[in-house]
Amino acid sequence: MDMIKKLSLAGIVPVIKVEDANDAVPLCKALSDGGLPVAEITFRSDAAQEAIRRVHQELPDVILGAGTVLTIDQVDRAVAAGATYIVSPGLNPEVVRHCQKVGVPIVPGCANPSDIEVALSLGLTTVKFFPAEALGGLNLIKAMSAPYGNVKFLPTGGVSESNLLDYLNFNKVVACGGSWMVDAKAIAAKDWQRIETLTRNAVTLMLGLSLAHVGINSGNPQQAEKEAKALCGLLGWESKDGNSSIFVGGGFEMMKKPFRGTHGHIAIGTNDIARAKWHLERRGFVFDEASAIEKDGKLKAIYLQEEIAGFAFHLLQR
């Protein structure tokens, strides 16, 4: 899996300034425990290289990048320490070519169409949009996406919980860089639990997991119709008859013949099913790959391998 795909599945890239290399490992562990095994450690402090080295050695599962990289020397130092990708605030062709020469992915900062055209001339199609909010935010990304339809963006700068979903809901945004979950006061106080909580909240917001509908194995068409009528009478909802089931409103699906799950199935809606699957797999959940339903080449639904409380569970693209 290429690096851009990994960052896309993670969804949020915590941007970290480490003043004390001793903080790097517990900080990145808190991020990982909160659901984000990814970190962009910026070269805005003298501790950056050592911080990257320690995280690389002690937390090898963390997707580790070096940010605010301005020079070829910083690229070499970051890669030697263990960084697996490079991020720069602007687009320096010399730095880009060096990254390409040594084989490390780079996401350079672009602020306007001219920057994007330079990036394209260098063979890059994913760029950082920085400083995102100050430049015009999502509106400018959408405007630039019209003439540059093959370019993907990683907006950073001003991204927060209040606008995260707006950015991620646009299909030209691969992920968002942010620092709100790595609160400077919490780092100074070494309050790693606080950072873990902020990270978990960010991941929960991003995935947007919620109940979509409950499928009930009625057993046969007659029973399904009877139970659907009862629910319509109870809730005042309308029913919709289909080939294999009867939907009651949007909340219940009465199966006309036994389907997945001992009792039935439960659909969990999500903002991004591929991203949700990746995050849930990190939590230990296993999916039945044979159950995947795709439309236009994109995943729309997929079941967990195991039942929970007698119900099969599946993710559903919202």
Image (tube, rainbow, N blue to C red):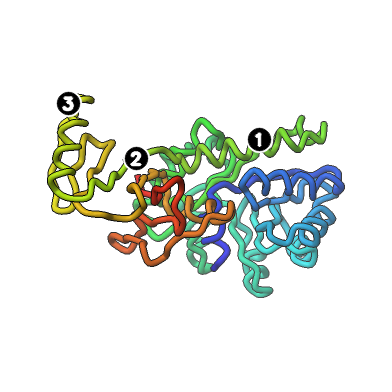
Q: Residue at x 54, y 46 (%)?
A: 176
Disc number for residue 212: 2
Disc number for residue 233: 3
Q: Position of residue 245 (x, y in %)?
A: 19, 48
Which dot, 3 or 1, sits closer to the camera?
3
Quarter of the image where one finds residue 97: bottom right
Marks 2/3 in contact by CB < 8 Å: the verdict is no
Side (left or right) of 255 relative to 140 = left
Q: Hey, what amino acid is under mark 3?
A: Gly
Q: Position of residue 262 (x, y in %)?
A: 36, 51
Identify whether 82 is placed above or below 280: below
Q: Hey, what amino acid is under mark 2?
A: Ala
The one nearer the camera, 9 or 115, is 9
Which of the two labelled residues, at mark 2 and mark 3, occupies the earlier sequence position? 2
Distance from the alpha carbon under mark 2 to that under mark 3:
21 Å
Provide the residue designation for mark 1.
Answer: 197
Distance from the alpha carbon under mark 3 to that under mark 1:
43 Å
Q: Hey, what amino acid is under mark 1?
A: Thr
Tell me, yes or no, if residue 129 can be seen here: no
Q: Position of residue 225 (x, y in %)?
A: 14, 41
Quarter of the image where one finds residue 291: bottom left
Q: Quadrant of the N terminus?
A: bottom right
Which of the two labelled residues, at mark 3 and mark 1, occupies the earlier sequence position? 1
Tell me, yes or no, if residue 275 can be seen here: yes
Q: Residues within 10 Å of mark 2 (few under 14, many from 20)?
A: some
The one nearer the camera, 85 or 140, is 85
Q: Position of residue 232 (x, y in %)?
A: 18, 30
The one nearer the camera, 255 or 68, is 255
Q: Quadrant of the C terminus?
A: top left
Side (left or right) of 267 relative to 160 = left
- Callout 3: SS: helix
Q: Residue at x 42, y 51 (%)?
A: 273
